[in-house]
Image (cartoon, rainbow, N blue to C red):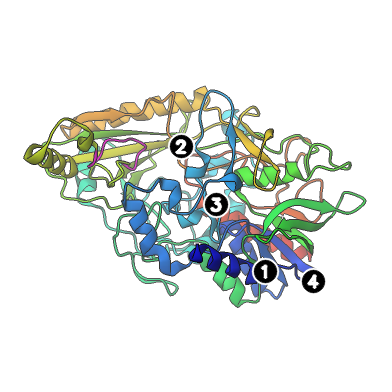
Amino acid sequence: MQAKTRRTTRAKSIDRAPSDRVDVCVIGSGPAGALIAYTLAERGHDVVVLDAGKRFDPANRERRMEMALRPGHDFVDVWEMGGRRDRYTVSGDRFYQLNRTRVKGIGGSTLHWVGMTPRLHEKDFEMRSRYGLAADWPIDYADLRPYYAAAERELGVAGAEDNPFAPPREEPYPLPAFPPSHSDSIFADACEEIGIQMHSAPQARNSEAYDGRSQCAGYGTCMPVCPAGAKYSADVHVRKAEAAGARVVDRAAVQRLRHDESGEYVESAVYVTPAGETHAQRADAFAVCCGGVETPRLLLLSESDAHPDGLANSSGAVGRYFMEHPSVSTTAELDQDTRQHHIGFPTSESHQFYDHEEPRPGSFTLEFQNTAGSDVHGYDGGGGMGGILAPLYGAEWGDDLLETMRDRYGNTVAVSATAEQLPDAESRVTLDRSTSDEFGNPVPNIEWRVGSHAVETLEHALSIHRNIVDRIDGTITGQTDPRTPGTVAHHLGTTRMGDDPDESVVNARLRTHDVRNLYLASGSVFVTGGAMPPTLTIAALSLKAADHIDSAL
């Protein structure tokens, strides 16, 4: 009871009253919001950041790692997700575990991400032009190329120029790549025999000390927590933004955006504090950076007479075209020791099957998982279960059980594949008015549709998995069903970019078509998702948005 009282007193003692009218109000402090806030504060603008989540103390990372390792805690416990604040519902035939794929807090979901940072390829921006599929972006790779380089410097990306399939780049990675693991070398021999080229995997993780952060210590708990702080998280740029003069208000849950009489300008962001106080932060420009679920939800909650279907939603596209990255994995046991423990992140991958000539099957990436079965929770890194603790649920006891656990933890390998998913207007985020959060607002409802394009692509990927495992004389112990694939925590497409206001929500400058001082920056603006982790692209788009906001102020 005393601890609860102290926390409540501390929450109330923080000044969460609004600032006087500022230049920019940024909503959300993940990589998009943090980079926009930092960039604009560095350029002398008065910036306020509002985030619904709390400010986590970096000194508590080791305690959170212990929580991640102990079976007594669920995955969502590590970053305090769940409860009425984080309610959501799911419709359709696929359950979507939203709270396992996001974090509400200063730093956003980069507090628990894996850390992979490849760039999208040129073809990802031109799907309609090249294949007659989906739609083209209003920008191309060349437009984003300098922002990609800047984002790699800001995040501290470790990588090597050994990927023959990568899009063109202008300068080396800021940090050297991580060396391949022993299990990578086992895969490499097999892949060479069947003509698959492996290469290093770029990632925002320090292979050596960088930007005041330590070198990776190899704890292996990268998702959900890096206790060393060597993996980038957006609270890095939140602190930089504050050093440059920005004000960051945590536990300030924005309820809606209010506009002027014309409906063409947002005047304030209305938010609620832990003490139950309601405030309105006024600003000249607003940047909503809340990800692919909460961004459309906030716009839909901001409906008015001028915007009856939700703010900036004259196209009806807000919430539609929700995309993920469906994934499959193959696990196998070998008659040799893989000589590893769970590393926590892939060190090698292959983009050989990315730039396809024909429309189908689509793009996918191969990732060679550094998993010795699983972490102690039984998660194998590729979406499957059955790791070191799985034998505990069997019939063995004593020495027999110990021997089974030793074998399982020393001779298991896994390869995964992540596929592109085409946008579908009926795959969407809406408001569920039958269920409310702690503030009485309708919660987001998610209806995620995989689509035949992704299923066909994943089936092709699994056939390649089987070929690789056969070459290493492995025995397959599990494969994902491509009709019910896993997901990799990427929420994309729900406020898409475009030149046509009747078909999209924001333009090429990341400003909404309908509201002149409202910018959106997150995975929600993606037109297509490609088959790459999106965080580096989100960071690049955010730096681009910051330039446009700066020019407009």
What residue would you read off at disc 4? 20
Could you tell me which residue is drawn at 50 percent across and 25 percent down? 453
Q: Nearer the viewer, mark 2 or mark 3?
A: 2
Which secondary structure, mark 2?
loop
Is the residue under label 4 in contact with that under label 1 (CB below 8 Å)?
no
Q: Quadrant of residue 136?
A: top right
Q: Residues within 10 Å of mark 1 (few under 14, many from 20)?
A: many
Q: Nearer the viewer, mark 4 or mark 3?
A: 4
What residue would you read off at disc 3? 537
What residue would you read off at disc 2? 487
Could you tell me which residue is drawn at 43 percent across and 75 percent down? 212
Q: Relative to residue 265, is residue 371 drawn left or right?
A: left
Q: Is residue 150 above or below residue 454?
A: below
Q: Residues within 10 Å of mark 4 (few under 14, many from 20)?
A: few
Which secondary structure, mark 3?
helix
Q: Nearer the viewer, mark 2 or mark 4?
A: 4
Amino acid found under the numbered disc labelled 4? Asp
Q: How far is the residue under mark 1 from the one under mark 3?
A: 19 Å
State the predominant SS element of the stretch in magenta: loop
Q: Relative to residue 31, is residue 21 drawn left or right?
A: right
Amino acid found under the numbered disc labelled 3? Thr
Could you tell me which residue is drawn at 41 percent across and 26 percent down? 482
Q: Nearer the viewer, mark 1 or mark 3?
A: 1
Q: How far is the residue under mark 4 from the one under mark 3?
A: 33 Å
Q: Residues within 10 Å of mark 3 (few under 14, many from 20)?
A: many
Residue 50 percent location from the top left of the image:
66, 61
Q: Nearer the viewer, mark 1 or mark 4?
A: 4
